[in-house]
Amino acid sequence: MMYFNQTLVQETFERFDRDGSGKIDETELRDALYSLGYLVPPLVLQLLDSRYDDSAGLDFDKFVECGMIFKGLTEKFKEKDTQYAGFAKLSYDEFLSMVIPFLVSY
């Protein structure tokens, strides 16, 4: 999901929807995002799952939404992490300007 490729995302969802239910659970979400290049910390995974899982798992549309938010926030963070150290120094205003557009648009 480094760039949005509908076919790749659809194939990834289908590969990790192991039971063929049309939905993926938290573990499948973790594995799917990892296969797309994202190592999601357990706490973040739980937050994503609680936000997007409607008790029966995430359907494809919610998987795409979740992935796009994670992708966008990761890209914004990388803009501030100029040393690629996994850390960034930013003001509260900078933080809000990074995060709010993703909260509002999804």
Image (cartoon, rainbow, N blue to C red):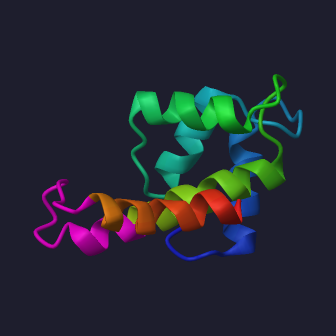
Is residue 74 within the magenta segment?
no
Left or right position of 5 against 96: right
Q: What residue do we see at 34% from left, 65% from top?
A: 93
Which residue extends farthest top? 55
In the rendering, at what x and y percent does residue 36 appear?
Answer: 51, 57
In the rendering, at what x and y percent does residue 70 appear?
Answer: 52, 56
Quarter where residue 73 is shown: bottom left
In the rendering, at what x and y percent does residue 87 appear?
Answer: 17, 54
In the rendering, at what x and y percent does residue 65 appear?
Answer: 70, 57
Magenta-tinted stretch: 75-91
Left or right position of 15 against 42: right
Q: What residue do we see at 82% from left, 29% from top?
A: 19
Left or right position of 54 against 13: right
Q: Is residue 78 above or below residue 14?
A: below
Quarter where residue 76 is shown: bottom left
Quarter where residue 80 is shown: bottom left
Q: What residue do we see at 67% from left, 67% from top?
A: 8
**Which quarter of the image is occupied by the C terminus?**
bottom right
Q: Is residue 38 above or below residue 93?
A: above
Q: Main secondary structure of the magenta part?
A: loop
**Which quarter of the image is occupied by the N terminus?**
bottom right
Q: What residue do we see at 65% from left, 29% from top?
A: 50
Out of 31 and 15, give the one closest to the viewer.
31
Is residue 83 within the magenta segment?
yes
Which residue extends farthest front? 93
Left or right position of 84 against 30: left
**Label tally:** 0
Out of 21 and 89, give the one closest to the viewer.
89
